[in-house]
Amino acid sequence: MARAAWILTCLLLAAGPSHAGTRTVSTLDGLAPGTRVRMQGTIAVHGDTPLVVLVLRLKDTGEVTLKPHSPDLEQELRNLDGLRVVVEGAVLPRLDPEIPRLEVDHYDMLAPPGAGDPIIGIVSTENDACIVTAGDGKRYWIAGDLAPALCDHDGARVWMVGKKSKSGHGAQPRGTTAFTPTGYGVLNPAPAR
């Protein structure tokens, strides 16, 4: 039961809607604390545990320090180090006039270089088949060379890129689309059992 609750929580986090009144911006300069914004950039992790700082590197306007709204969100953003995202949240007061800050409550991962849009979901196994269930409820049967590696993360929230495939080895589970990943990453490991 706890595992089902974990999966539901992760799926709801992934599908979180944008808040009304959110502005898309490229800089936080001139914005009042509390203003809701969306920004695009590359996640970067500075420092070492326990003194880790998450930042969003912007294309032309420097960096924004990120304060994730929850520990799960912080874990996921750390695991996206070096990848492009759109983050959404509220502008925080500046502790240093030169360092803009944003409290992040939602993100969308953008396509990695040379890949299609990522699929984000929870890994599970059914009758020895590896399945990834996305936030929209679509289920992907994982085929190809990366299937065993993905199956090792049963219960984890992952991202993957690749292509739909015609089939894999064995019988395709009902209600699934065959998918051959060319890359993946673990966003949040499976909860302890």
Image (cartoon, rainbow, N blue to C red):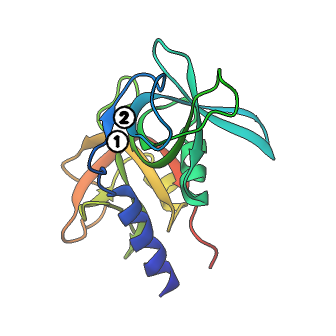
User: Of the residues under marks 2 and 1, which one precedes in the sequence?
Assistant: 2
- Image quadrant in which you'd find residue 176: bottom left
User: Which dot marks residue 110?
Assistant: 2
User: Which dot marks residue 118?
Assistant: 1
Q: How many marks?
A: 2
Instruction: Answer above or below: position of 104 versus 172.
Output: above
**Residue under the point 49% across and 21% down:** 58
Instruction: Answer above or below: position of 124 versus 35.
Output: below
Element under disc 2: loop
Amino acid type at circle 2 is Leu
Element under disc 1: loop
Viewer-nearest residue: 25 or 80:
25
Question: Can you name the residue that lies furthest to the bottom here?
Answer: 1
The percent position of residue 133, horizontal first and vertical second, equals 33, 63
User: Which dot marks residue 67?
Assistant: none
The percent position of residue 104, horizontal first and vertical second, equals 50, 46
Front of the two marks 2 and 1: 2
Viewer-nearest residue: 123 or 49:
49
**Residue under the point 38% across and 37% down:** 37
Q: Is residue 90 left or right of residue 23?
A: right
- Image quadrant in which you'd find residue 128: bottom left
Question: Can you name the residue that lies furthest to the top here?
Answer: 60
Around disc 1, counting alpha carbons within 10 Å, would you say few (fewer than 14), some (14 to 19), or many (20 or more)? Answer: some
Instruction: Answer above or below: position of 94 versus 192.
Output: above
Q: Are marks 2 and 1 in contact (CB under 8 Å)?
A: yes
**Residue under the point 45% across and 47% down:** 146
Viewer-nearest residue: 145 or 94:
94
The percent position of residue 17, horizontal first and vertical second, equals 29, 55
